[in-house]
Image (cartoon, grey):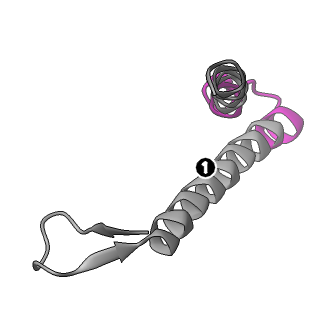
Amino acid sequence: MKLPFVGQIPGRVVDERFLEHRRRSTSLGGIVAAIWALGLFEYHVWRQHVWNWELLSIPVAMAVVKLFAMAWYHFTD
């Protein structure tokens, strides 16, 4: 399936592989960012004995959103 590329030259299309690669790379980027934030949180707790709740909120928010989305897709699909 090819989709027209909005705002580009007429006749140019976007392949579905491009959209799938963009989805996967965005997902991977989000996961890496959450793991990085969790690692920074643990570093601050272990080395500096400081609880930085803002860093912990990032992976927690990602987990909550992921679980909610999984439940939503399970019950609505």
Q: Please say if 4 is above or below 71.
A: below
User: What secondary structure is the stretch in magenta mostly built from?
Assistant: helix
Q: Is residue 76 magenta?
A: no
Q: Which residue is mark 1?
A: 30
Residue at x-position 44% and y-position 69%: 1
Residue at x-position 68% and y-position 43%: 34
Helix, strand or loop at mark 1? helix
Residue at x-position 69% and y-position 22%: 64
- Front-most of residues 54 and 9: 9
Residue at x-position 34% and y-position 73%: 14
Q: Give the amino acid at mark 1.
A: Gly
Q: Please say if 26 is above or below 69.
A: below
The magenta region covers: 43-61
How many marks can you see?
A: 1
Residue 42 placed where, x, y %?
Answer: 83, 38
Q: Please say if 51 is above or below 36.
A: above
Q: Is residue 13 left or right of residue 69?
A: left
